[in-house]
Image: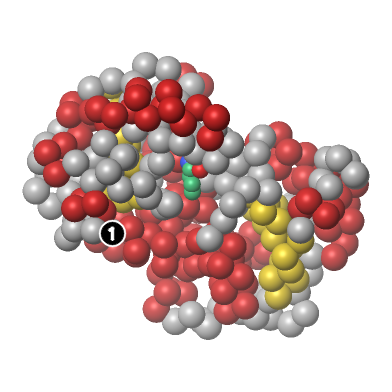
Amino acid sequence: MTRSFLRDDDLAPDELITVLDLAAKLKADPYAAKPLAGPQTVATIYDKPTLRTQTSFAAGIAELGGHPMLVDGSLAGIGRRESIADVARVLGRQASVIVWRTYAQGRLEEMAAYAGVPVVNALTDDFHPCQLLADLLTVREHKGRLAGLRVAFVGDGACNMGNSWLLAGALAGMDVVIGAPAGYAPESVMFDRANEIGAATGGSATWTTDAIEAVEGADVVVTDTWVSMGREDEAKARLAVFSPYGVTEELLGHAKPDAIVMHCLPAYRGKEIAASVIDGPRSVVWDEAENRRHAQKAILAFLVQESGTP
Ligand code: NVA
């Protein structure tokens, strides 16, 4: 059966740990696993801006012994010049895995339905599961565990990162609290799914509009841009709504004294995070950025192995 990674809960809780363990192994020894050895090719397509994702996939695929094939989505005209289904059928004949950053989650689902090879979500409007693999690896490195930790996600909860933290946090048995203004929390279906997962893992997902309440006693404080890619038209209104939700030294004072601070980047200093916080001693953002490579190598190796991809 072909396994794809379209959203965080495409992995079972035990599979998540397997992938994180492999990522840690690959970080210690980058050439330990070469499941993509030989002529295997991974198609990578970016419909939105990218720095970390494109470079970490390219470097990681090369380290696995595979070839990253950059497909220009606008030249291909995916969904315009050719249907997503036809593009999927063609790419599935050329590549062992398809990695795609795009807008609607439905586009990615359609690609996966027709490709016949694993498809990996490199960020959609709804989820950013590769970032969460890197983030959980980073938390585990700094805290030594995941289950039972309290995570405060402060700011725009109604974006890919908010949704992914709810699901991945629940899989890992963490208690995730979203601190977001009304209208900017994840949809209730996300909380329901996270709490359904959490019933088995011990995790939980909750929301408050009070940033201080969210951060109170947190082990991990997370934020993200207030203006996600594709939302640029709303920038002015968003900056006004989110201004009480910036991760400042003062807000961080409500977290545990040894709390770490995370941000998937790009960061806007003085907006969602103070410069002194992101550049300060509790920030682990550069570890997160590095861990994208190790985590993505692990999920690629896992999917190829599970799918028996030639
Ligand atoms: N929520 C952000 C994440 C960037 C990596 C966005 O979608 O732009």
Mark 1 lies on a secondary structure that is loop
Which of these two is toward me, 201 or 102?
102
What type is the residue that disc 1 sits on?
A: Val
Image coordinates of residue 72 in percent, x first then y, are 76, 58
Question: Which residue appears farthest toward the top when viewing the image?
Answer: 182
Residue depicted at x 78% and y 69%: 310
Residue depicted at x 86% and y 40%: 80
Residue depicted at x 37% and y 53%: 136
Image coordinates of residue 304 in percent, x first then y, are 67, 64
Can residue 145 be seen? no
Residue depicted at x 17% and y 29%: 212
Which of these two is toward me, 251 or 68?
251
Mark 1 C-beta closer than 8 Å to ligand 1: no
Going by the image, does 115 lie left or right of 282? right
Which of these two is toward me, 204 or 210?
210
Q: Which corner quadrant of the image does residue 182 belong to?
A: top left
Give the color scheme: rainbow, by chain, secondary structure or one colour. Answer: secondary structure
> In the displayed structure, would residue 164 be above or below residue 144?
above
The residue wearing badge 1 is: 284
